[in-house]
Image: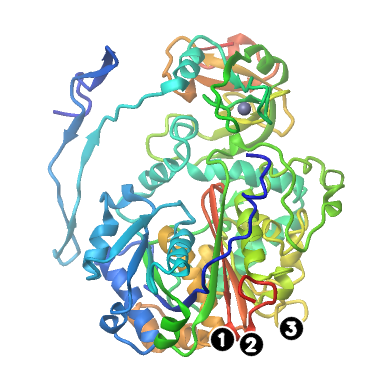
Amino acid sequence: MITFSDKQLKTPKMARPVYLVTGGMSKFARAFPDKRQEELCIDALTEAAEFIGMTPYELKKYIHTAYYGHFADHFGDQLLGEAAMHDRLGLDPLGNVGIKTGGATGGSTLWEAYKTVASGYSDCALAMGWERMDEVPTDEGNNYISFAADKDWETPLGHIYTGYYAVMAQRYWQIYGKEEDSFRRTMAEIAVKNRGYARMNPHAQGPMKITVEDVINSPVVAYPLLALDCCLMSVGAACGILADEKTAFELTDHPLRIDVAAGSHTLRVADRRNMEIPLLPNETKEQYADLGERFPGGDRYPGFTGFLAARMSAYYAYRMTGIHDPTEDLDLVELHDAFTISDIQTYEDIGIRPYGEGRTYVESGDCYHTNPNTGAPGKLPANLCGGLIGCMHAVGATGIMQVIEVGQHIWNRWAEMHSDEGKWKRFGREKPADWTDLQVKGAKRGLAISHAGVGSHVTCTILQDPNHTLEGGMFE
Amino acid sequence: MSCEDENRGTVKVINNRYKPSGHFHYGSPNTPILNEMGKLLGVTNPRDITHIHSYGGEAIFFESLSKGKLLATRCDNPLCESHLSIYEPFRIHCPDCLVKATVLDITDLAKRTATVHSFMITERTGAFNTLEVPIKFVNVEFDGVCTILMGYLSLGNPKIGMKLLPIFNTKAPTYTILDISWVPAGTPESELPQNFTF
Ligand SMILES: [Zn+2]
């Protein structure tokens, strides 16, 4: 579709508010030769239970249905892995379902659990996501991932998914980045920032202390994408517990309001047609009238440079929660930084910056925990866990991990969950001598974007402290 | 039995039923995965399988590539908001009204107007890749077509805005999307890769 009816653009109205009660995650790594997937999922569920002072046994008594995000059956060579996991978690005979939306699987899993609680079907639901990407060699892994593209029209072309994405990066790089060295440095800053933040995260797989020059000098993967512009391939698990108000406050004194919305776009980038830009609350049609003049070639929307699915997930989510301007209304975000350049594209799709101006979110210092230009707190810190570039991309777990990370800031428990010496030791990782507390002080509201491939599915999750919800939301 | 077997599986369709013959799967024994102490951690699971796949309504598109023709489709439903939109990739049905679209031969249009919308060059590939590295993808736009076909460039270096010509594997077709490739406008026939013609 390229035009949308009022019915299609309706703001979702849930039957009752939904709360994130707790969440947890496993260690993330490239490979776990000594662990089955269920061991990692049990680690995640145990962390979630302990976070609210319960045992997994006690927490399980509240769970009424379960939602399992696990994308690539091929990797684990197991169909119905969700059923196996449900049994290993000892949750039979409760209803459960598997969710698969590529890189957005984690976010989509939360979306399903959210709707179940909002509808009244369940008062408490488990959203658990994982991925096992270490059971084939990397080139076979690339082949399997390429089957998430169209198997007749794209996969035979190199069996390399990064390539299908890189053609979009190329177009953004030339039109909006204008192939400038300064834009290259801005991309590299994201890679440096996210890997640097990953150093403070014991769960993270890819911490690195590097410079912009290190990124710029890293090998070309698919120009303009360099090796250090790209995210990790990971194994691990993450889970969240969602509940209605009554159950949430039985489980904890501090549940967070959660809302999730989703959008989609063509599986093949090839099939994208031109359309008008669906506007977010902080945008006007007039501001984009000269986009093609300011950025020659940029008059085609979404073209290869915008993610319509991300735009639509924010379109719904902002109206559901009363967000007018994400930079003003939110305190932090976790974005799907599969590549540094897609991170910049997403700033525009979700209205942190207008189309064409994504780079200024980085260059202003707003995206940092501490603004490097001013030394003051960043206006809207992004990816403090390290993101997909520094922390992990265990596909089915990623979108859930991001939401738990945002939650830990709003709960004001980020330092507790990231500084614990026991956890660093248990994960066999050395806590850096310069470990820094990245808690966003006074965080009340945050957002996480979960995104699939070239943009086929995107979810936008909003977390809010229930005492500081925005006006204009569904229940306000 | 090795997977290099001459008798690897092939399929015919008789009376709209699949008639497979030959070997569709090859197994070999699994092997233990041990750590440096000789402790068992897991096993390998080798296997080789031939899948069967129907192109359905797109079969005409793939068959035509082997004859040097690029087919597209157009919505001819006057009641549709996308009436007269032309699609490449070929779509069996209009994405808006879902009426069966009309098949068009756009080979000449492609020869006249094919232009690089975007591109990508990479040395990296996945298992089973058959293209030469570095791979050069080109996303090709055509005048009057509302979508942008992805393909690969066989000669030269891609650039946004560059004019291209389609070439077709007519001599030894694979009946896959690899049977169409692209070369810079002005390339003489003598320089085309093996098995390809204009
Ligand atoms: Zn139509």
Q: Is mark 1 within 8 Å of ligand 1?
A: no
Both on one chain, marks 3 and 1?
A: yes
Residue at mark 1: A437
Q: What residue sits 66% from the left and 44% below the top? A: A170
Label 2 vs 3, first from the N-terminus: 3
Q: What residue sits 53% from the left and 74% below the top? A: A17
Locate the N terminus of chain A and report the quarter of the image it occupies: top right
Judging from the image, what secondary structure is the residue with disc 3 in? loop
- Residue under mark 3: which chain is it in? A
Q: Residues within 10 Å of mark 2 (few under 14, many from 20)?
A: few
- Asked if marks 2 and 3 touch (Cβ < 8 Å), the reply is no
Q: Amino acid at mark 1?
A: Asp
Image position of B145 (left or right of B132): right
Q: Residues within 10 Å of mark 1 (few under 14, many from 20)?
A: some
Residue at mark 2: A442
Q: Nearer the viewer, residue A119 or A284?
A: A119
